[in-house]
Image: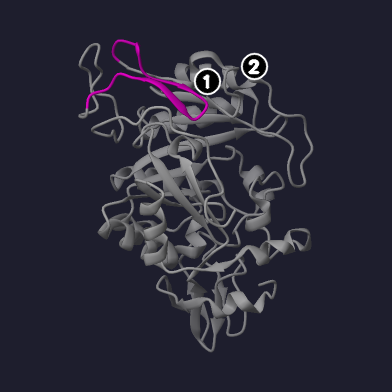
Amino acid sequence: MDDPNFLDELTIAGRFFEAAGRESLRCLACAHRCVIPPGRRGACKVRFNQGGRLRVPWGYAAALQLDPIEKKPFSHFLPGSQVLTFGMLGCNFRCDFCQNWLTSQTLRDPAAGQGIGLARRISPEQMVAAALRGGAQIVASSYNEPFITLEWAQDVFRAARRAGLKTAVVSNGYATPQALEGLAPDLDALKVDLKCMSREGYRSMGGRLEAVLETIRLAQSLGLWVEVVTLVIPGFNDSNEALWQAARFLASVSCDIPWHVTAYHPDYRRSDPATPAESLQRAAEIGQEAGLNFVYAGNLPGRVGSLEDTNCPACQRAVVRRRGYRILDYQLTGEGRCAHCGAAVAGRWPEEPIRGAPGGTDWLFG
């Protein structure tokens, strides 16, 4: 299915838009709020105006994979669980360090054009059946930007909820309040990529910092479980000042938001040296000094000491010990209390822990 027009057939009428005059529509899925005249597309390239009606992606996946939830990364959302993660094509950003560029940049960059061939038809019911067959407890939208394919995620999540599964989104956070509030009733957890704390940095990626910060604030106020990741890139966002700004912002929203500082490796169009373990340790120390209760260092298993573990904020003893995506020890009750001192540990915890989750596999579409 290498024909780009094939994707336009896999669409439905959009639900997140408003009229903008003369058959133009203002899309409300992401913070670009594109005004789209008839026959034109939004910045994401996948939402388009067909004769005065918004058409949006639906009914396919370009990636479908069974993973440990820790890979997303989530550390406080049903640790040890398996998640079936699905993705479509397209993005509203143009990050030159994107690690999912084959799916996210397919419609924007000819170098990623073969990504179109990954698309396969699937229904929400088939997606849920695949999750149950694989032993997943969670269904998540990722790999491209979920908010530009919002209606699809919403319909998959509603089917997942009916089957007793939890739901999650892995996003760049460039959503509108209307989109986030519309998805929230069908969503359990949101992981946001806070890429930097620089307005200039976000402009270079095609977005605005303030919109991402507002998504984090709103998601927290809506009662979603929120975790935040910052890919620490040498020379881009790894200065002490930049890291302090990110940590202080998160602490101002809630000291219980887990902050993942993860290692960059050269990919797509950026070839800077990979992030050293020392930079992640420094970032984690800054997060802890800023008052965050839970700071994790990722992508370098075994090289960042105890920064993969969850510690009780009261007694500081490890309640979840990890190595990479595997749980080595689990000392939390089903109510999320520390087995050592009884203090509550913020998160969404399983009644029975699943230890030693396996690594990810390209489970269906590979």
Asked whether 323 falls inside the magenta stretch, the response is yes
Asked whether 318 falls inside the magenta stretch, the response is yes
Residue 243, position as x, y percentages in the image: 57, 27
Residue 65, position as x, y percentages in the image: 52, 50
Q: How packed is label 1: few (under 14 Cα within 10 Å), some, or many (20 or more)?
A: many
Q: Residue at x 54, y 89 (%)?
A: 51
Amino acid type at circle 1 is: Ala
To which residue does mark 1 refer? 284
**Quadrant where the image shows the N terminus:** bottom right
In this view, 363 is above or below 159: above
Q: Residue at x 46, y 16 (%)?
A: 289
Q: How packed is label 2: few (under 14 Cα within 10 Å), some, or many (20 or more)?
A: few
In front of the other: 258 or 266: 266
Q: Quadrant of residue 298?
A: top right
To which residue does mark 2 refer? 278
For the view shown, which residue lies furthest in the front direction? 133
Residue 80, position as x, y percentages in the image: 38, 33
Q: Which span of residues is magenta-colored?
A: 314-333
**Precedes in sequence: disc 2 or disc 1:** 2
Q: Quadrant of residue 200?
A: top right
Residue 17, position as x, y percentages in the image: 44, 73
Q: Residue at x 68, y 26 (%)?
A: 275
Q: Quadrant of residue 161?
A: bottom left
Q: Residue at x 41, y 65 (%)?
A: 126
Amino acid type at circle 2 is: Glu
